[in-house]
Image (cartoon, grey):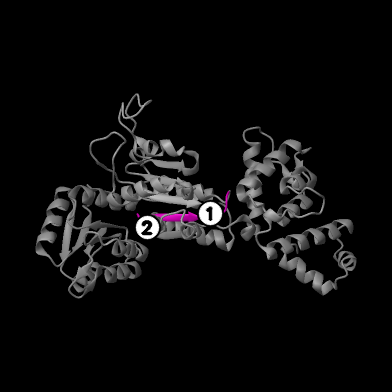
Amino acid sequence: MSPRQTILIVDDEPDIRELLEITLGRMKLDTRTARNVKEAQEWLAREPFDLCLTDMRLPDGTGMDLVQHIQLRHPQVPVAMITAFGSVDTAIGALKAGAFDFLSKPVDLARLRELVSTALRLQTAGNGARTIDQQLLGESPPMLALRKQITRLARSQAPVYISGESGSGKELVARLIHEQGPRAERPFVPVNCGAIPSELMESEFFGHRKGSFTGAVEDKIGLFGTANGGTLFLDEVADLPLPMQVKLLRAIQEKAIRAVGGQSEVVVDVRILCATHKDLAAEVTAGRFRQDLYYRLNVIELRVPALRERREDIVQLAANVLKRLAGGSGLPPARLSAQALETLKAYRFPGNVRELENMLERAYTLCENERIEAADLRLTEASGNTQEGEPNLAQIDNLEDYLESVERKLILQALEETRWNRTAAAQRLNLSFRSMRYRLKKLGLD
């Protein structure tokens, strides 16, 4: 028989402590109680806990002090904050500080039981999922940092805004946050907000009742209902029209939805993750996105790096794509020639990992003898240049990146023309050998 899990309750009001003890006792959980920060810290030093529930206002400090103490000394213990009704800023501040989740007073017991059940599943979270590094490839510093952030955010229920360019892997990041967290066994529901017609949006998100409008021939549960207990990933959230933003904000604040044609609200337990390739703060400034919704969605921002910011990962990513393309054919994966590989490293990849995958799939069908040459990559076509040597200005969003790409291309051309004789290539480019060696190292070509 496994030992019972133990919850630490921190509140200076005896009635609240008793209510929480009774409720958790009925869930077959052991409890310990503390009246202030000092007593809570003493309990934490004496024995292990599976969850801490703390009030925000305490006689000798705040719940935030306790969150910070636990983050530093007992990071394996999730903390849920109990805040005064309507204290949105306090709740968001607690999530930013590392709290697992929050409850508002008066405490809704059904909501409390859901929160506790979710938090206790953290003990086994991620055990059945593939490891992050098997799915999110790359050993560059930005990717190592990203995987570390995903692991940390998976232990929270805070809304996360995932920013990054198109094709950089934002949905994969969202899915990994879900898979590594306590909701892993529950639904992960991705939705492209820009793909839903505005007149159907409310029905798609919240569901509808039969007969509520023309064409509603049966009840529909909606995306929030489908994701209940799990995670709802709102991709391209900046594309939501303003009227829908209002309704989404209310659903997030109230943790409840009303179906179109429904008579009452239904409580839902959904973690919200969102993403967009647009600058959401700029959309707020332009008046196209509500500031209050922005603050509720952007509790924590997680940026996914562009492929050009982690060029050293291209070799591993390309090898993985080619291995997948070989599939069950029994043939060895196609190989990239040295020139093809250097050409990939020199390219800016405005479409990021998705563009790399598409490029290699096309080259795989064109290559001969399972060997992909630079010509098979069709980079002139991919870059969208209308004339040879003419840059596509729409793709030059960073002058240094573009100049580095031009420099790399010219050096590669000189090396190929001199059969990779570095001294001869330096002379052709009117560079000293020392300068040539420096540039090769800077561009990762040495």
Q: How crowded is mark 2: few (under 14 residues within 10 Å), some or many (20 or more)?
A: few
The quarter of the displayed image where residue 44 is located: bottom left
Secondary structure, mark 1, is loop
Image location of residue 228, percent across then percent down: 32, 41
Secondary structure, mark 2, is helix
Q: From the image, which quarter does the C terminus lie in?
A: bottom right
| Nearer-N-terminus badge (1/2) | 1
Q: Which of marks 1 and 2 is in front?
A: 2
201 in magenta: no
Question: Going by the image, does 139 lie left or right of 266?
Answer: right
Image: magenta residue range? 155-166
Question: Which amino acid type corresponds to the residue marked 1 in the rendered image?
Answer: Lys
**Residue 348 showing in the rendered view:** no
Question: Which amino acid type corresponds to the residue marked 2 in the rendered image?
Answer: Asp
Image location of residue 312, percent across then percent down: 65, 59
Relative height, residue 377 to residue 5 (above, below)? above
161 in magenta: yes
Task: Tell me the distance, in whole angstroms, between the alpha carbons under discs 1 and 2.
Answer: 18 Å
The residue indicated by pointer 1 is 278
Image location of residue 55, percent across then percent down: 21, 64
The residue indicated by pointer 2 is 292
Which secondary structure is most common in the magenta stretch?
Answer: loop
Name the residue rendered at 33%, 52% in the picture.
122
Residue situated in front as seen by the camera: 45 or 308: 308
Image location of residue 112, percent across then percent down: 22, 51
